[in-house]
Image (tube, rainbow, N blue to C red):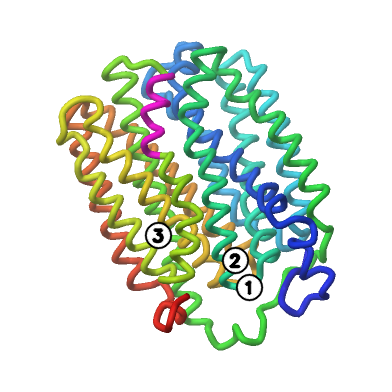
Amino acid sequence: MNLSPDAPASHRGGARRNGGTFLLVVLCIPMFLVLLDVLAMNVAMPTVGRTFHVPVARWAQVVDAYTVPLALALLPAGWLVDRIGPRRALLVGITVFTAASVVGGLAGAWLVVLGARLGQGLAAAVMLPAGLAALSTSWPEPHERARALGAWSSISAVATALGPAVGGLLVAAMSWRAVFWVNVPLGLVAAWGTWQQLGTGPRRPQQPQPEQSGRGAIATVSLVGSVIAAAMMTSGANGTLQVITVHLQSGLGMGAGPTGLLLLLATAPFVVLGPLSGRAVVRLGRRRVAALGFAVGAVGLATLGRLPGTMGLAPGLLGIGVGLGLMTSAIVGESLSAWPGRPGVASGLNNALRQTGTSLGVALGGWAAGWWSGTPLLVRTGAAAGLWWVGAAVLVLVTFTRSRRSRKNPR
């Protein structure tokens, strides 16, 4: 699907003619599925581990079995998307993801669960860059793309907001198997929407437009900075959420349902701020918005373990949510803008580093939970994650492209 500025008018208007909102929702479903399965399983993993009599130290395997192959496969998947087109890639990814979910729902052994998670992770590696590549080419104009990315961030953030609560409620009301089964109807809807909304398009990747030439060095710096910032974003957020989940369920004995509801404090702000971040990027530029998100999040993280009671976690959780809501679309947009001729590879790089950050954060969170507990665990985690995000804010200010629009008279 070639929706570049010099494409035929019939292609260029496809997103609007087919209904831009519906197309955007279709492109967000793959990200919705990916995030839902990360966060819902984070809450469900203690129940899965206990079902198969797996020690606490190995609980995180059910998360890493998904995130590690996802991270490793994203780069070759991005190349594949640019070769065969987003439509074919999305259909393949969604089909495999749905089939693996069925296997997980029927699993009778720990290794089968891990195998199903592996299949989901590999399929998700195709779905992520395919969805973002289709979004990038469907809205080629920078300001329209910024707004579309803001809406994408908001819609996909619904999965982030619902993930912990859905995981907890499904486990409490039915079984951990329901965390797998819920993907099946969503996968069928995503496959149908992809088939209906996306054209087959050319197999060869788009080439950079003339106005983008001569920016190689600047694009390289911003691309490297954006993907590293993506890794720092997810490692700080998901590593901290891993620690808080273990603290609540293992340390305080809180059930999966209440834990999921409490974690909404870290995800609900993401939903509200998604579209607002798109407008902020248009007005202020990606550099300022991403740096602000990291700074706000760092302040919240620094409060962990320093306030009394379970609700003393609220400022830290809110800091994570507000930070992610501000920075996500800005960081993703920076990667896509840095390599406009290869949206599949650019989004693959961004998502690869995001998933690598998640795997690293979850692993470090599990390690920290093995050494400390209670208030010391929270204080050390909050301090380390807060400093990590301060460093990320500095990185963004140094490497992200300065917005020409933000220096002029913004609308």
Cα–Cα gap, marks 2 and 1 = 6 Å
Earlier residue among tags 3 and 2? 2
Q: Amino acid at mark 2?
A: Arg
Q: Amino acid at mark 3?
A: Ala
Q: Residue beneath label 1, please? A: 141
- Is residue 138 at least partly visible in the picture? yes
Residues at circles 2 and 1 in contact by the CB criterion of under 8 Å: yes
Question: Looking at the image, which is closer to me, 400 or 120?
Answer: 400
Where is residue 332? Give x, y as percent: 51, 60
Q: Would you say 136 lies left or right of 8 here?
A: left
Disc nearest the viewer among 3 and 2: 2
Crowd class of label 2 (few under 14; some 14 to 19; many from 20; radius 10 Å) = many
The image quadrant of residue 8 is bottom right
Cα–Cα gap, marks 1 and 3 = 24 Å
Say above or below: 237 vs 138: above
Q: Would you say 130 lies left or right of 283 here?
A: right
Q: Residue beneath label 3, please? A: 229
Mark 1 residue element: loop
| Magenta span of residues | 257-266
Crowd class of label 3 (few under 14; some 14 to 19; many from 20; radius 10 Å) = many
Earlier residue among tags 1 and 3? 1
- Is residue 61 at least partly visible in the picture? no
Q: Which residue does the image show at 39% across and 64% down from the upper left?
A: 289
Residues at circles 1 and 3 in contact by the CB criterion of under 8 Å: no
Cα–Cα gap, marks 3 and 2 = 20 Å
Mark 2 residue element: helix
Q: Which residue does the image show at 41% across and 26% down from the upper left?
A: 261
Q: Which mark is residue 216?
A: none
Q: Would you say 287 lies left or right of 118 here?
A: left
Question: Looking at the image, which is closer to me, 140 or 342?
Answer: 140
Q: Which mark is residue 145?
A: 2
Quick check: is 262 in the magenta stretch?
yes
